[in-house]
Amino acid sequence: MSGVPMTEVDAALAAMPVIDGHNDLPMALRARVGYRVSGLAADRPEFHTDLARLRAGGVGGQFWSVYVPSDLPEPEAVVATMEQVDAVYRLVAAYPRDLAMAYTAADVESAIGSGRIASLLGIEGGHSLASSLGVLRVFARLGVRYVTLTHNHDTAWADSAADVGHVGGLSAEGRAIVGEMQRIGVLVDLSHVAVTTMHAALDIATAPVIFSHSSARAVTDHRRNVPDDVLGKLRTNGGVCMATFVPAFVSAEVAAWTAAAEEELRRLGLPPEPEPWPRAPRPGEDIPDSTVAEAPAAFRLWLAANPRPEATVAQVADHVEHLREAAGVDHIGLGGDYDGCDRLPVGLEDVSGYPRLLAELATRGWTAPELEKLAGRNVLRVLRAAEEHATEPMWPGRAVTA
């Protein structure tokens, strides 16, 4: 990387390691190795994530997504989410010198200070709550620090970006769930939700919210990205939008190719992703390599005539810069979505890639203090603000009240 100002990157990561908003390793462990957590120290090419590459990437904190598909029956989703939570605890217990469970901003700082990677929990989809405030509170007491209000399907109380919309954003029940989350110190995550839901949540939020893995819709017009008017509200709210690396979200060329490939698969009567849970379909995000490898001759002919474009580090940096322009440098972060999508941009293929993105931004004039905010200071501030706002915080180590 000749000519890249790595001194700024090194200084930034030494002062503030990356705290990433979204990594789907727990789901990948379930899908590929039956939740076996051994052997993740290094050299695991079937994953985007292992401990050696987290270290190489300058990661000091990770929100592990405890994702289950949003088309599961809700009681089944609660059980499956509990299994995902268990997987994270087992992962951390298997590597006590490298990982530490974290529930508060102080825990994150303590873990980083001890040379370990702070491990936090984030639920990806309100279906995992089964419309129960009691389930929400139990997950909070287990250490869950954010809940994404929807995944790819509407819930009874919130509209998803990938579904038709049933309640106009948030219902009265949805507003009550958002209020309870903020009362007990669980971050409201607005990735995956419809724009109407983004506005509805920001209109009632009394503490900062997050987008754990979303980029800028003004740069790539994808339903999973955040419009500028929402980013303006996010600045006022004090929250943070954590730029994601999913190729179809960051590259208009990849998004167009993905849509065309999905249409061709439908024309041929083939599913975009034939595997059921544990690898649930995520329409519009990418066409997985497994689909390509197993495709019949007709689709392979289409692929030969329409080669898949690649997203780049520079395109991700374009999103980060736009998020900064629209929301402010104090309201941006990183949420790579590693092990939650099939492909990543060139240069960001695994969790060792964060310094390359920071180096690209440094070439564009970002200073070390600005890179520190992006890497982790902003999300750490939001985590602390949620704690201070909570009137009945519920995470391990806190007293349980009536």
Image: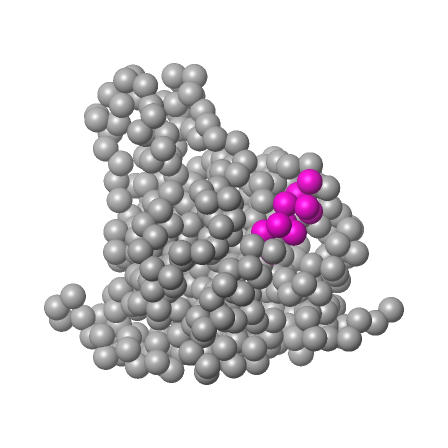
Residue 115 pos. (x, y %): 42, 78
Q: Nearer the viewer, residue 328 or 27?
A: 27
Choose top left, top right, bottom left or bottom right for residue 153: top right
Q: Nearer the viewer, residue 39 or 215?
A: 39
Tell me the residue at 39%/39% (across/down): 286
Residue 56 pos. (x, y %): 31, 67
Residue 247 shown left or right of residue 110 in the figure: left
Tell me the residue at 67%/78% (across/down): 388
Choose top left, top right, bottom left or bottom right for residue 3: bottom left
Tell me the residue at 29%/48% (across/down): 311
- Residue placed furthest toward the left: 2
Residue 120 pos. (x, y %): 55, 65
Q: Nearer the viewer, residue 79 or 368?
A: 79
Q: Nearer the viewer, residue 25 or 89?
A: 89
Quadrant where the image shows the C terminus: bottom right
Magenta span contains residue 231? no
Please tell me whether residue 244 is drawn above or below residue 271 in the rendered image: below
Q: Magenta-highlighted stretch: main secondary structure? A: helix
- Residue placed furthest toward the right: 402
Quadrant where the image shows the N terminus: bottom left
Magenta span contains residue 81? yes
Tell me the residue at 28%/75% (across/down): 9
Residue 126 shown left or right of residue 282 in the figure: right
Identify the colour scheme used: one colour
Residue 55 appearing in the image: yes
Please tell me whether residue 19 is drawn above or below residue 113 in the rendered image: above
Residue 212 appearing in the image: no
Query: Which range is magenta?
Result: 76-85
